[in-house]
Image (tube, rainbow, N blue to C red):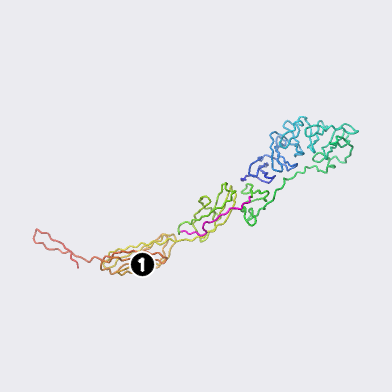
Amino acid sequence: MKPIECVSLTRFAPHIFQMEKNGKKGLVKEDGTILVDAVCTEITLFYDHHALLLAKEKGQTRVLGNITDTGEYNLYDSVYYALEGQYFYSDGLLSVMDENGRKGYIDEKGQRVEEIFKEGYDIIKPFTEGYAAVFKNDKYFLINKTGKKENITLVDVGKLWGGTNVFEGEAYVWDEDKTIQVYNVETKKCTKKSINSDESDYLYCFSEVTKRASKVPFQEGPRGVMGMAPTVENGLWGYVSKGITVLPPQFDYATQVEDGLAVVRKNGKYGIVRMIEDTNPFDVIPEKESVEYWDGDLADCTFDVNTPEVWGKHPLKVKTIEGTKGIPLEENGRHYAFSYAPQREKHDFEVEIICEDLILFKKTLTYAFEKKMRPLVITISVNQQADKNGKVGVSVEVSNPNISSISTTITIDGGNASFHQKKIEEVTIKGGQSKIFNTSFYGVNSTLHNQYVTVTTSNGKAETRNGVDLIPYPQNTKKVSVGKKDDSEESEDIEIFD
């Protein structure tokens, strides 16, 4: 049942619950359907398998309907008011007064015994054993359920004046002088009998005879089959059966399961939960418990949700929590994924499956995270042209594409037909930064082809540049003018190499 706001919610009859709010009472079915809104000032307990729905109206107590102890309910189409002291069905009929002030009886469906209403009785009593004591102008009559009056003749005394209801086939009757006799409804005859006390029970018979009290023995509805009791963890109530959590602790109040149903309260709202046996319970299964991720990137975590068949058509919400923070999820059928920036090698995540604010299932998933470092990026630059000392400069840039720093040993070597200055250096390169290393070929006095430079790191990254041509430094040159033959010829500059 969806949560509702009320002061209390209690089991009243099989599949029927009584709610209270704003000082009034109402009835709710187990699925949340409201049978009677909270308009009743009182809902009586059961007598003769019925309870009455009562509401104060115009200074009187109106009977809105009734509910049986098997969970059936009837709301009346017509207006009826309950009679003081007779707020109960007896022998299948209820004593009432209609909106015109006439007294009579109605059955459990609210249908009236019209013949009795027409008589205009001043006082009527509940039916017992098919008969009821009624009064008009202070005179007593014993009627059956059709309204027919019994023809009672007293023995050797005055005319009939008063009387009681029927108990075990007999009604006590008396004349104006209160001389008591007993009228048998089977033989239709009166016999003389005395009584020591004229105190009446709740059905208007002599208590001395019936041994019944003056108060109506109302009873609660029949109990159902009792199931699991709630358990408490950290002040919250939940349900555990045979060591398996059926409903995670989340309620601030919960009742024992009865007929497969229980009343719970959460965040100030009441609801009804139904316990259903299912051989295919909820479960959350990680696709991989160990997750690799690149330094600086998020780790991708995935899991599958196993849903019982009974919940297949319900709108379920899956929630992942790390600490107190929710993590957005991507959903694809029963497959879920989320991204996470690990702070340590292992993290615990709470996965909850929720429907209408009810946590149906909760499980802790533990993921182990393995950070992978991206390889260093090595760029090799060679000038090729030697300087005047016969050296060719080599520049090596080593970049760290990760966020974390990397410590490594850089080894730069090269050669082939030429000599190269080997270099070995231990360095730490911060994330996102790079370092430049300079070496050189030396003794380059002539053009050399197919030279190489190799860069290796202690963490396994290596790079080689092959096919490098080394060119010697041009020798110094000077310009010399060649003389002209005559004035008409121009002089010519030529270069002479040392």
How crowded is the residue under tag 1: few (<14 C-alpha within 10 Å), some, or many (20+)?
many
- Residue 85 vertical placement versus 247 (above, below): above
At horizontal 62% and vertical 55% (from top left) the residue drawn is 245
Q: Quadrant of the N terminus?
A: top right
The image quarter in which residue 69 lies = top right
The kind of residue tagged 1 is Ile
Q: Position of residue 218 (x, y in %)?
A: 75, 43
Q: Position of residue 155 (x, y in %)?
A: 90, 34
From the image, tell me which residue sits under label 1: 412
SS of the residue at dot 1? strand
Position of 289 with respect to 48 (left or right) is left
Bounds of the magenta segment: 276-293
At horizontal 11% and vertical 63% (from top left) the residue drawn is 483
At horizontal 77% and vertical 42% (from top left) the residue drawn is 216
Q: Position of residue 323 (x, y in %)?
A: 55, 56
- Residue 488 vertical placement versus 163 (above, below): below
Residue farthest front in this picture: 279
Is residue 278 found inside the magenta-colored segment of the image?
yes
Q: Quadrant of the C terminus?
A: bottom left
Position of 459 with respect to 475 (left or right) is right
Residue sitting nearer the eye, 186 or 373 = 186
Residue farthest left in this picture: 486
Residue farthest right in this picture: 156
- Residue 168 vertical placement versus 381 (above, below): above
Residue sitting nearer the eye, 482 or 50 = 50
Label count reads 1
Position of 391 with respect to 338 (left or right) is left
Residue sitting nearer the eye, 481 or 246 = 246
Q: Position of residue 33 (x, y in %)?
A: 63, 42
Is residue 464 found inside the magenta-colored segment of the image?
no
